[in-house]
Image (cartoon, grey):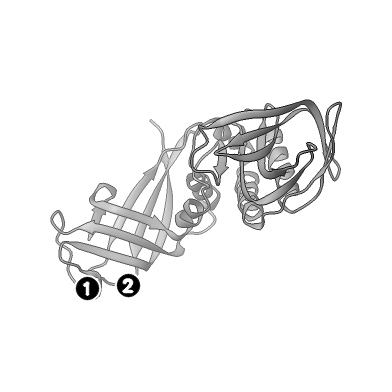
């Protein structure tokens, strides 16, 4: 049965789920473990501070201690990124990182090299390398490790560097989903991609029976590009009786084949 994407309440491929579960939805890249960041108070600012991680030197950064929801955070920021990590602030003004909460953002940029540079910098931080702090009001070292964020940034770097050179700069300037960029990397490399999907659809609108297979087409709009991508998904295993509910059909990890096609823009 051929379905329009609009007939489905839910449709996610394995790769799409991988991105969404890692909060890698779209650029600019931003993530926080803090639910509400509106209650923000400045505790202390250290002004311009140089950051050193391995061979990487970042000048013209600004560092400060802020309070968010009664917890203290040490924030490092420049025009291209910011990173805040939860700390224990002592009475003498010194502090120690607490591996509970953090937030970071890589701002949208027109310069691909700088974007990748900031990804690599955050990777160095999340792998646990010590960050040396050099400033008039602050000197010392701070380290913070998070393997999940390291994995996310590795994946992001791979997708960005995998894009054709002629597309990279324009694609990064727009708010494209990272899943659409991943499909662009796969386009032309495989005629058919073996995968699986999760889906849910309403039986009030469709007549789906046991034994049916499902075919869905989706068009992914690529801003900053001269063509879009048509994604065609066909399930390779039939609908089973257990997947048919009272008023819905729900498929979980349903094996499928995915093919991709260029759609020139008019």
Q: Quadrant of the N terminus?
A: bottom left
For the residues labelled 1 and 2, the Cα–Cα distance comes to 8 Å
Q: Residue at x 31, y 54 (%)?
A: 10
x, y (%) of residue 141? 83, 43
Classify mark 2: residues with Cα within 10 Å, few (<14), some (14-19) or many (20+): few
Q: Nearer the viewer, residue 144 or 109?
A: 144
x, y (%) of residue 49? 80, 29
Placement of 147 over or under 54, stated as above or below? below
Q: Which mark is residue 211?
A: 1
Q: Residue at x 27, y 52 (%)?
A: 9
Give the left or right position of residue 14, taking residue 157 as reference: left
Q: Which residue is mark 2?
A: 237
Q: Residue furthest front?
A: 91
Q: Nearer the viewer, residue 224 or 68?
A: 68
x, y (%) of residue 186? 53, 53
x, y (%) of residue 214? 27, 62
Q: Secondary structure at mark 1?
A: loop
């Amino acid at each position: 049965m051929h379905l329009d994407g609009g007939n489905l309440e839910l449709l996610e491929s394995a790769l799409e789920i991988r991105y969404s579960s890692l909060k890698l939805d779209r650029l600019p890249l931003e993530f926080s473990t803090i639910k509400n960041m509106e209650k923000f108070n400045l505790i202390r600012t250290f002004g311009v501070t140089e950051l050193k991680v391995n061979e990487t030197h970042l000048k013209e950064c600004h560092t400060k201690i802020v309070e968010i929801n009664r917890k203290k955070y040490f924030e490092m920021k420049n025009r291209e990124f910011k990173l805040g990590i939860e700390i224990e602030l002592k009475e003498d003004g010194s502090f120690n990182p607490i591996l509970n909460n953090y937030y970071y953002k890589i701002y949208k940029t027109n310069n691909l090299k700088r974007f990748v540079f900031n990804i690599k910098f955050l990777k160095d931080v999340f792998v646990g390398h010590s960050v040396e702090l050099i400033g008039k009001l602050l000197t010392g070292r701070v380290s913070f490790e998070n393997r999940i964020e390291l994995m996310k940034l590795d994946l992001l770097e791979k997708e960005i560097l995998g894009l054709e050179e002629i597309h990279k700069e324009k694609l990064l300037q727009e708010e494209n989903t990272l899943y659409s960029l991943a499909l662009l990397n796969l386009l032309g490399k495989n005629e058919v991609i073996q995968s699986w999907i999760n889906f849910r659809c309403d039986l009030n609108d469709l007549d789906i029976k046991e034994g049916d297979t499902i075919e869905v087409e989706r068009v992914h709009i690529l801003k900053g590009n001269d063509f879009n991508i048509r994604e065609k998904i066909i399930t390779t295993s039939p609908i089973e009786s257990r997947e048919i509910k009272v008023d819905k059909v729900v498929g979980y990890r349903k094996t499928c084949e995915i093919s991709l096609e260029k759609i020139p823009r008019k």
